[in-house]
Amino acid sequence: DTTHGPILYLDDITVSFDGFKALNALSLTVERGELRCIIGPNGAGKTTMMDVITGKTRPDAGRAFFGSTIDLLRLRENAVARAGIGRKFQKPSVFEQLTVFENLELALAGDRRARAALTHALSEAQRERIDAVLVRIHLREQLHRQAGALSHGQKQWLEIGMLLMQDPLLLLLDEPVAGMTDEETERTAELFLSLEGEHTLVVVEHDMSFINALTRDNPAKKVTVLHEGSVLAEGSLATVQANDKVIEVYLGR
Ligand code: ADP
């Protein structure tokens, strides 16, 4: 059941690599419909946390639930995706030789490797879904363009669009605006704010101007600061920025 209570619940997660704790009793709760920003210095454990959620890394200890009943630690990576968790890595990953539309068409088919899917005729409803996503990711005018000819930012949007074709409940995004222009960053913030509520977003990000943009509609929106594998601080952006421990971690290095 993923309709009540938190959508993501991590409890006391520890991940050790040769005795080094990449995650050290990490606990994190994300409510459905939230847009949660996760920040923290390099090595804080952000990637490892995403790897645990998506079944790529198994923790040594702890619990991880998606909704109230889906035990993430019992699922393989592909089953996590099927359960409704979409992950976007930092680098864009699109089919460069295919058009924007074809990339979305493949993503709709579910299996991004199944090029045979392209030969299937789309229903009117499927066309409408692709069209709605094209508008959302600002690529409606580019639908016939080869993905390889898009700008870096447009490729990132296309990949987010591909994830949206699967209608995920939870989207995990790793530094989505790295390498984007200011204008692309602003449009990405608008996109994420439009997805909030309908989807849950967990965004790992270094760019403070982007985090500012993602919290501008609601200054009380929660931001989580990771450090040395656990949560150092959590609260509004203003609160965590004024937190002495956070200031020390960011400035004391
Ligand atoms: P972040 O994404 O916040 O930069 P990571 O989760 O990538 O942090 O890494 C947390 C810590 O765990 C780092 O010190 C990193 O060197 C270590 N680490 C991550 N993955 C491995 C691995 N496969 N083997 C050994 N150490 C790792």
Image (cartoon, rainbow, N blue to C red):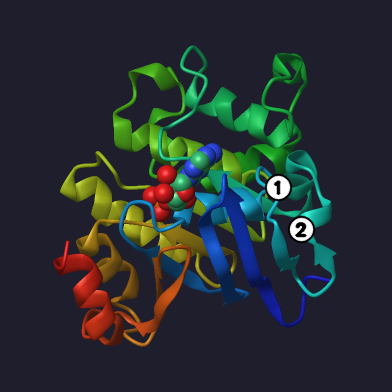
**Residue at the image point whose x is 33% and y is 75% from the top:** 215
What residue is disc 1 on?
55
Q: In the picture provided, is 223 more to the left or to the right than 178?
A: right
**Residue at the image point whose x is 78% and y is 70% from the top:** 2
Look at the image and tell me whether residue 175 can be seen.
no
Q: In the picture provided, is 185 more to the left or to the right than 226?
A: left
Dot 1, crowdedness within 10 Å: few (<14), some or many (≥20)? some
Dot 2, crowdedness within 10 Å: few (<14), some or many (≥20)? many
Q: Quadrant of the N terminus?
A: bottom right
Q: Earlier in the sequence, mark 2 or mark 1?
A: 1
Which quadrant of the view contains residue 76? Answer: top right
Q: Amino acid at mark 1?
A: Gly
Look at the image and tell me whether residue 231 can be seen.
yes
Q: Is residue 241 above or below residue 116?
A: below
Q: Amino acid at mark 2?
A: Leu
Q: Which mark is residue 72?
A: 2
Circles 2 and 1, Cβ within 8 Å, touching? The answer is yes
Residue 242 versus residue 196: which sits nearer the camera? 242
Residue 166 versus residue 38: which sits nearer the camera? 38
**Residue at the image point whose x is 19% and y is 43% from the top:** 181
Residue 220 versus residue 123: which sits nearer the camera? 220
Q: Position of residue 161 (x, y in %)?
A: 52, 42
**Residue at the image point whose x is 81% and y is 63% from the top:** 71
Q: Secondary structure at mark 1?
A: loop
